[in-house]
């Protein structure tokens, strides 16, 4: 490893105008390191790692692997310092902004590394700025009140962020207070401030062999995962359809919220995952869950077995984020195996071309861009995979919204990709509106909402992998005639004799009440003939309606026990 002590770099002049092999090797190593650094920083900016640093460096197109790997690691280690030093100058304000990764690598060599050879345009430019760079570094040391660069590095180290251990209490077997009391005997436990049956324990707490976990009284479940079932707000006695149920943690959470009453149809296509789902249900003690080994997309919305479901929960356990690194690494290996002979031949031709060239300065490196093409190939393959997954998720959500009796639909993924989250929701909004659904806001107190890519995205819920230590997405659809989770469909309601009539002026018609004394309290309305006017059409203001028709204390009776007969009048 190179020393991190502050020392000025020495600019070596090329004797006879021809650099040595070591100088040429250092020149190429800096540019190869810049290519790798660009891929790493670009992946970090999008939070989508293409591959590890070692995988990128040890690709066939990188010749001086050892020097390149050391340069990349040391530049990343000193990157916060390099950014502050360069920020104090005007170096990155001009044309070099497009090559900032190369500027980082060369600046590291100037401030902390080896001697720089005057054989590249970037090296020549930065060596002219050497005094300004060293002055900026000295001022930074004084500002941070440290004497050595090693102490400065300690200040820039990101503190390790540890994720607390979340456990969900299975209220079918144990109440939250008793679970908290038992866990507090060994650990510092507390209740979560958002999910009612969730407990928070110190980071690193190992509960895999704990008796409460083994007997199903407590489930090891993250906070974001526990928020999905709570967002649906199921009530005891309701019917819920759970699509893509395995492994079953959210399914049994639904059963606990419903207090074991009602019915949950847990749908799962994969046979092996069905077994795991059944094991989870058995361990939880839930008796109101019916496992259905079938494809959710093939369920008939008019089938009596499913047509009465009031809620649908759609969750996708494997989004595009969790297996992204494995997929990208696989793509890199496959592409590398196919192109390896061709790339070795290309680099040999390129090496001969550089050897016979009369000038080594200011030339582009077309073949070194193969590394960037590797990254692009992996990115394209991943984009296609995410798009296919998003298409399936879109179909599943549209199918869930088509069930006739459904009042609430929750859609969740463990992915941070916009294509699987906001784009899916945006694409089904017209269909949802045609079925009478609108977006609701789960957990209004949660600060992180959806990306502002369409109007209404503030209703969506996101968790941040950096802040919350897990990436999750939740969207909630609610039918417009459902208020605060209460079922208000008129076909499920039977009006009582003491129920007031609906607003007679709603939907373009009003009720004409003819006052008549005496007679039986008959509530049968006269039949309406469509588009036939039985009285003169009148348009009253809101105050006129109140003045004409006093409040009704009973069905069809006023305080003076005056009987009313309803007559419908169509207003054209």
Image (cartoon, rainbow, N blue to C red):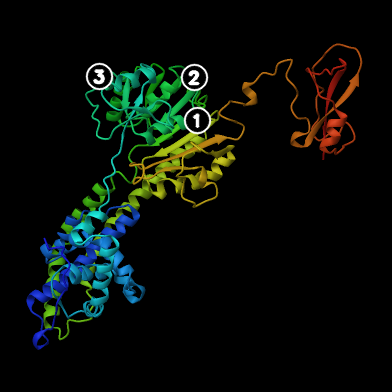
* Callout 1: SS: loop
Instruction: Give the distance between the C-alpha atoms of the residues marked 3 and 2, in whole angstroms.
Output: 28 Å
Quadrant where the N terminus lies?
bottom left
Name the residue at the bottom extreme.
Answer: 16
Left or right, 425 with reference to 520:
left
In depth, the one of 529 and 260 nearer the eye is 260
User: Image quadrant of residue 112?
Assistant: bottom left
- Rendered location of residue 456, percent (x, y): 54, 46
Left or right, 154 with reference to 386:
left
Q: Which residue is mark 3?
A: 211
Of badges 3 and 1, the one in the foreground is: 3
- Rendered location of residue 68, percent (x, y): 15, 64
Q: Which residue is mark 2?
A: 236
* Callout 2: SS: loop
Instruction: Give the distance between the C-alpha atoms of the residues marked 3 and 1, in whole angstroms.
Output: 42 Å
* Callout 3: SS: helix
């Amino acid at each position: 490893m190179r020393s991190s002590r502050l020392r000025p770099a020495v600019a070596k002049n090329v004797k006879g105008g021809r650099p040595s092999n070591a100088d040429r090797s250092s020149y190429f190593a800096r540019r190869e390191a810049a290519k790798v650094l660009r891929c790493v920083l670009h992946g970090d900016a999008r939070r989508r790692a293409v591959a590890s640093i070692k995988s990128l460096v040890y690709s066939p197109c990188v010749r001086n692997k050892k020097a390149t790997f050391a340069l990349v690691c040391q530049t990343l280690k000193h990157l916060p310092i390099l950014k502050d030093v360069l920020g104090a100058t005007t170096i990155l304000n001009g044309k070099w902004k497009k090559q900032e990764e190369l500027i980082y690598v060369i600046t590291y060599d100037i401030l902390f590394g080896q001697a720089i050879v005057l054989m590249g345009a970037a090296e020549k430019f930065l060596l002219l700025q050497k005094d300004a760079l060293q002055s900026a570094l000295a001022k930074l040391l004084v500002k941070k009140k440290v004497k050595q660069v090693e102490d400065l590095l300690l200040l820039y180290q990101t503190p390790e962020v540890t994720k607390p251990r979340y456990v969900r209490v299975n209220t079918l077997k144990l109440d939250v207070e008793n679970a908290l009391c038992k866990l507090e005997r060994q650990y510092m436990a507390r209740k979560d401030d958002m999910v009612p049956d969730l407990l928070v324990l110190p980071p690193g707490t190992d509960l895999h062999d704990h008796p409460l976990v083994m007997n199903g009284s407590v489930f090891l479940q993250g906070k974001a995962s526990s928020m999905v079932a709570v967002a649906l707000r199921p009530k005891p006695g309701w019917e819920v359809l759970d699509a893509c149920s395995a492994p079953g943690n959210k399914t049994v959470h639904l059963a606990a919220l419903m207090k074991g009453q009602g019915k949950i149809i847990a749908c799962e296509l994969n046979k092996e995952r069905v077994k795991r789902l059944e094991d989870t249900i058995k361990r939880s003690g839930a008796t109101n869950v019916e496992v259905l080994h079938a494809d959710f997309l093939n369920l008939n919305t008019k089938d009596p077995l499913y047509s009465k479901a009031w809620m649908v929960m759609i969750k996708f356990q494997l989004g595009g984020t969790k297996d992204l690194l494995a997929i990208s690494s696989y793509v890199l290996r496959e592409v590398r195996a196919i192109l390896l002979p061709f790339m070795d031949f290309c680099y040999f031709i390129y090496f001969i071309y550089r050897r016979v060239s009369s000038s080594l300065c200011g030339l582009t490196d077309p073949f070194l861009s193969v590394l960037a093409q590797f990254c692009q190939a992996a990115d394209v393959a991943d984009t296609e995979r995410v798009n296919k997954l998003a298409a399936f998720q879109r179909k599943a959500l549209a199918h869930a919204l088509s069930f006739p009796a459904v009042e609430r639909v929750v859609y969740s993924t463990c992915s941070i990709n916009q294509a699987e989250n906001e784009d899916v929701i945006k694409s089904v909004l017209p269909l949802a509106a045609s079925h009478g659904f609108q977006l609701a806001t789960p957990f209004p107190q949660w600060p992180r909402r959806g990306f502002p890519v369409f109007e209404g995205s503030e209703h969506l819920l996101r968790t941040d992998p950096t802040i919350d230590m897990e990436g999750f997405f939740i969207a909630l659809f609610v039918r417009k005639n459902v208020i605060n989770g209460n079922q208000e469909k008129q076909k499920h309601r039977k009006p009582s004799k003491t129920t007031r009539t609906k607003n007679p002026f709603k939907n373009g018609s009003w009720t004409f009440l003819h006052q008549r004394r005496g007679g039986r309290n008959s509530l049968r309305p006269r039949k309406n003939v469509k588009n036939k006017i039985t009285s003169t059409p009148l348009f009253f203001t809101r105050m006129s309606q109140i003045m004409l028709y006093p409040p009704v204390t009973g069905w069809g009776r006023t305080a003076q026990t005056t009987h009313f007969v309803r007559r419908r009048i169509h207003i054209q």
